[in-house]
Amino acid sequence: MSIAVYIAVMAGVTYLIRMIPFTFFRKKIKSRFIRSFLHYIPYAVLSAMTFPAIFYSTDNFISAAVGTVAALALAYLGLPLIAVAGAASLGAFITLLITK
Amino acid sequence: MSSKFLRGMAHGLPIGLGYLSVSFGFGILAVRSGLSWFQAGMISLTNLTSAGQAAGVDIIAAAGTILEMVLVQLTINLRYSLMALSLSQKLDPKFTTGHRLLASYGITDEIFAVCSAQKELLSPAYMYGMILVATIGWVTGTLLGATAGAIVPARVSAALGILLYGMFIAIIVPPAKKDKSVLAVVIAAALFSLLFKYVFTAVSGGFAIIICAVCASALGAVFFPVKDEEEQS
């Protein structure tokens, strides 16, 4: 099968998943449960995506753990997004330099 | 250019930089799986998502069926429907149907997270600015990885692998520090996620994330319901 067909199917499905609820949902949600649910969803999704995947995101566990701790510390201090992400990467890189 | 568009671009900058390095890895992966740099770039431009693209390339490389492609994309990317629904609740009246059709293209984990952290209603210009910068980063990184991936030292590309997760932490921690109920939901979601990683391993990654997020958020909604809108504002 042509690779272009695969790419078109991927793109089409992914777009519809985003477009349908974003475009056709107009009502303000009244239910307190659903509003609370939608309030928590972003944090729950990101947390589930991050843990434990972050510990497998570099070549070895120790470097990933150092990067994770660095990110948690800087995020707790309220530093901007790019500083926190950069610290995670730098922490992992330095650990990789030392350990292998 | 409107100030909202520029503000969106500024808020999109860390996302674009993060994407630049993550999509570098995707570019390497795509070329290794037998795609051309052009095909890799087209996938990134039309999909704008990480896990879904990686899974899609696997299916192309294995010459899988179209049905498999549809089901895998649906499962991994279904979380965007929840995010789109959540964002639809805080759109500016300027968001007409045309704007919704366009801006929905750019609902990613990171853009959603930054948008939902905004205090005011979301305008089309703000989202377009953010989506533009993020897309440029995502596509450029893919093309760079597809063409030059082989010459980057292994330690550098390994260390870059953690970048986006670092960004997720930067988004989660401040509200969790301020609000104990957010902290409880975050910890619950992480614990569920550990269960799927090490115990219920038969469940695919995308589906596991949906289950974890829905369960943790539902528990949060039952035990810590948010205040009514009038009280919030």
Image: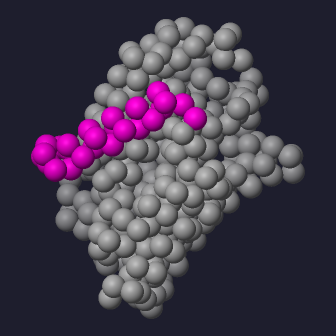
Residue B105 appears left or right of B183: right
Rendered image quadrant of residue B10:
bottom right
**Depicted B140 relative to depicted A32: above or below:** below
Measuring from the top left, give residue B21's x and y in whole percent: 51, 71
Report the magenta residues as a range: B178-203
Pick the residue in front: A1 or B163.
B163
- Residue plotted at (74% across, 23% down): B93
Pick the residue in front: B103 or B224.
B224
Rendered image quadrant of residue B39:
bottom left
Residue B212 appears left or right of B95: left
**Depicted A38 relative to depicted A28: above or below:** below
Measuring from the top left, give residue A70's x and y in whole percent: 49, 64
Q: Magenta span has A42? A: no
Rendered image quadrant of residue B29:
bottom left
Pick the residue in front: B76 or A73.
A73
What colour scheme was applied to this rendering of the protein?
one colour
Measuring from the top left, give residue B154's x and y in whole percent: 38, 85
Measuring from the top left, give residue B28's x and y in whole percent: 39, 77
Question: Which residue extends farthest bottom?
Answer: B151
